[in-house]
Image (spheres, rainbow, N blue to C red):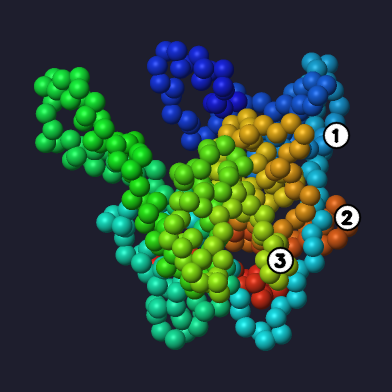
Amino acid sequence: MKLKPSILEEITASHFGAPPPPPKKYTDGESDEVFLEDESGRVKLVGDLITGSDSKKKLVLMTGCVVAVMGSELASGDFNVLDIRFLEYAPQAPLPSPNEDGKPRYLALVSGLSLRGSSYEGYHLQLLKEYLIGELGGLDDQAESAHIVQLIVAGNSLDANDEEETAQVSSSISTAFLPSAAQLTEAGQKKKKAAETKYGYDSSQFHPEPMQHLDSFLADIVSSVPVTIMPGDSDLANATLPQQPIHHSLFPECNKLLKEASECPAFETVTNPHWMTLASGMTVLGTAGQPTNDMYKYLPETDVDRLDLLNQTLRWQHVAPTAPDTLAAYSFYEKDPFILTQTPHIYFAGNQPYFDARLVEGTGDNGGQVQVRLVAIPKFSETGELVLINLNSPTLETTTIKFA
């Protein structure tokens, strides 16, 4: 794939200027080829199943996925593929029985809040907060929100681009009435630099208001609903997967509230990807969307959607197959943390372009039945949608609430 990023090409380009922006797609229908590789070598795969006109709709192949192929070697050294097989689903724990009272219990999912600061936010964020704490709508709406047992914020809570723009505006305003650099002595320039640096950070490089607003926003919610927050690629966390939790010190209001109220619901910062087990025993696996978004670049414009990719990662038993090739990830030597040894009951990806949900059923590699609710969570800053999953439903029914 000539359009796929290469670290060697990036290093070469860095000596001759800024590297080009990453492509929206890695695919090029005229030159792309498929190779099967292991520790012994690599071989080119050919045949109608791989290169035929209908093959792109039948197969989802990309770097890092584990497959088994059947065929024969040609005189040219290529391998003519007659059949291809993937792994079955990993074993799954039994689905917990619904509560006898029959009342719904909702798991709320939201991603892509993209906070820029209190003076820049839209009213839809205020509506979201009022709904979660039970102050929005009529009696039916308040009764529905009262059954929310957990809120998961799936990454990109901060808007990196707007944060930089706001910091530049703040810096330009703070220096608008200062003398020019040519009029300042060396001592004056040092004094100016010291004046711009406040509370241990450089205002031209870091703007604290978005993070402070996120802390205040979650503090208003955590008194009513347990909150779990994951980092995304625009949040204050390491860029490589698995991303470590956003540090607790960045949430002083939430921490203060938890210390003062011993009966207050929990507030937890977790990794990305993250596996969690709810109080009922139901298992949830989720990402902030980076693996799904990167895998989508390997596919041409076909009928394959985001949920198809989520389902394939369950079949491949690997959350991020393209890491660390085209998805930045820490290289583990002894154990790969992205390998799935168990299939979750709920599997979601945050920061997707649109909402989608699907219930998939299959057979695990141990012969047991598997049932998974797949969910693509849209960006709240663009769609204003909150996703609700009814944990008391046998099929984990999923709905959305739009704040507009």
**Residue at image point 81% right, 42% down:** 85
Task: Indicate the quadrant containing the N terminus: top left, top right, bottom left or bottom right.
Answer: top right
Q: Whole-percent x and y of residue 262?
A: 55, 72
Mark nearer the viewer, 1 or 3: 3
Give the residue number, with chain letter if any, for mark 2.
366
| Three-letter code for the amino acid on which mark 2 is drawn | Asn
The label shown at residue 70 is: 1
Neighbor class of circle 3 (other Cα within 10 Å; few <14, some 14-19, many 20+) is some
**Residue at image point 83% right, 21% down:** 40
**Residue at image point 43% right, 24% down:** 20
Give the residue number, with chain letter if any, for mark 3.
282
Let me know if residue 360 appears in the view.
no
| Three-letter code for the amino acid on which mark 1 is drawn | Met
Alpha carbon distance from label 1 to label 3: 38 Å
Is label 3 in a helix, a strand or a loop?
loop
Q: In the image, is residue 143 above or below residue 342?
A: below
Q: Earlier in the sequence, mark 2 or mark 3?
A: 3
Task: Indicate the quadrant containing the C terminus: top left, top right, bottom left or bottom right.
Answer: bottom left
